Image (cartoon, helix red, strand yellow):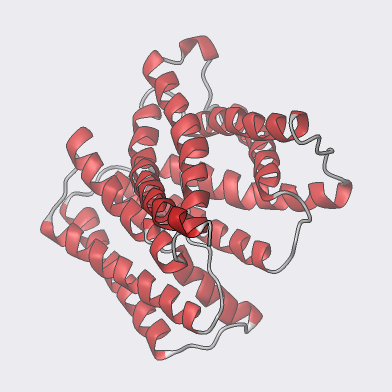
């Protein structure tokens, strides 16, 4: 009884946390695109993961006295780091060099659909309900509308490469999500994320150096450093804390709304800040796509199966 008066306040704070998650994670796509105008994409992702991962790992090692991962844990962390940070985050960041910000964010939001398809084809874990089928068809149709508007009306150099990178990133996140849901790593999840960031930072740095996609640190502009600082502090720390808070104090169906709002925030902010084209067709296509993603997630919740909705960049 004594906690009841605090519930409305906690719920109100939950909505504030949800708003922070939606806005900040939506803007990280735009800030990432600003950063890679002055620094190679993979190098930028490496620096971001190094700083963010160090913050998480040092906090839990110094404050919580957590030990280093054992060999079995490290092997699993390495696999997840490759899938969810090197492939998913790294390639989606790279895709921003070739395609509009909103399109990359929208493709990233499709991953619940690919999780369902991969689960049905390879693991036989999901039944295809009417809602799921309609959601899948709407998601594909919506992307088709946006892709047509972007690709065939105004086709920039490297557009198809950017779409390919973004799709591979989305599929990698999907596979990583399935691995997470099919086994327990037996570690604090935040501590595990920190290690995945550190591992991915090393791998991204090596790949960037080998492929010549790196510049001296002294050559990185102040604009790029400010962008990286925003991505670490706001995108990787503040919004992550806000997301966890909203999940604890709001219904799951409400807290997961950020997954449908992020791409729209990315599109609108990119149109304002980067002057990217935002047409009626792009908006309608995006709404159709996100409605499809919502129906897929809704049908899975109805069957008591979970899909984690995120990628942040």
In the figure, is residue 265 to the left or right of 186? left
Residue 138 pos. (x, y %)? 30, 76
* Residue shown at 59% from the left, 62% from the top: 177
- Of the pair 59 and 291, the residue shown nearer to us: 59
Residue 279 pos. (x, y %)? 13, 54
- Farthest residue to the left: give it: 280
* Residue shown at 42% from the left, 68% from the top: 253
In the figure, is residue 75 to the left or right of 34? right
- As drawn, 26 above or below 11: above
Residue 271 pos. (x, y %)? 19, 41
Count of labels shown? 0
- As drawn, 217 above or below 67: above
- As drawn, 78 above or below 56: below
- Of the pair 179 and 169, the residue shown nearer to us: 179
Q: State whether residue 274 appears in this view.
A: no
**Image quarter of residue 269:** top left
* Residue shown at 45% from the left, 38% from the top: 235
In the figure, is residue 188 to the left or right of 66? left
- Farthest residue to the front: give it: 2
Q: State whether residue 28 appears in this view.
A: yes
Residue 85 pos. (x, y %)? 58, 45
């Amino acid at each position: 009884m004594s906690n009841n008066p605090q519930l409305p306040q906690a719920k109100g704070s939950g909505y504030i946390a949800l708003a922070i998650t939606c806005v900040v994670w939506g803007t990280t796509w735009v800030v990432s695109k600003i950063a890679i105008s002055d620094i190679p994409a993979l190098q930028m992702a490496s620096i971001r993961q190094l700083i963010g991962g160090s913050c998480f790992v040092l906090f839990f090692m110094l404050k919580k006295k957590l030990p280093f991962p054992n060999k079995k844990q490290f092997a699993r962390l390495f696999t997840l780091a490759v899938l969810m940070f090197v492939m998913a985050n790294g390639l989606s960041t790279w895709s921003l060099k070739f395609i509009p910000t909103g399109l990359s964010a929208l493709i990233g939001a499709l991953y619940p659909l690919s999780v369902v398809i991969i689960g049905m084809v390879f693991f036989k874990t999901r039944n295809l309900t009417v809602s799921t089928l309609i959601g899948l068809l709407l998601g594909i149709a919506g992307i088709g509308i946006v892709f047509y508007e972007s690709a065939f009306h105004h086709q920039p150099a490297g557009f198809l490469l950017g779409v390919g990178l973004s799709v591979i990133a989305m599929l990698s996140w999907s596979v990583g999500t399935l691995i997470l849901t099919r086994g327990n790593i037996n570690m604090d999840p935040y501590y595990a994320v920190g290690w995945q960031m550190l591992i991915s930072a090393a791998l991204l740095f090596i790949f960037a150096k080998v492929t010549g996609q790196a510049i001296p640190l002294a050559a990185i502009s102040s604009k790029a450093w400010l962008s990286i600082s925003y991505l670490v502090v706001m995108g990787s720390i503040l919004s992550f804390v806000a997301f966890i808070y909203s999940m604890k104090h709001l219904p799951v169906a409400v807290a997961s709304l950020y997954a449908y709002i992020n791409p729209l925030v990315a599109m609108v902010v990119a149109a304002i800040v980067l002057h990217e084209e935002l047409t009626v067709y792009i908006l309608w296509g995006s709404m159709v796509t996100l409605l499809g993603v919502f129906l897929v997630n809704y049908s899975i919740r109805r069957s008591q199966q979970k899909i984690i909705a995120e990628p942040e960049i």
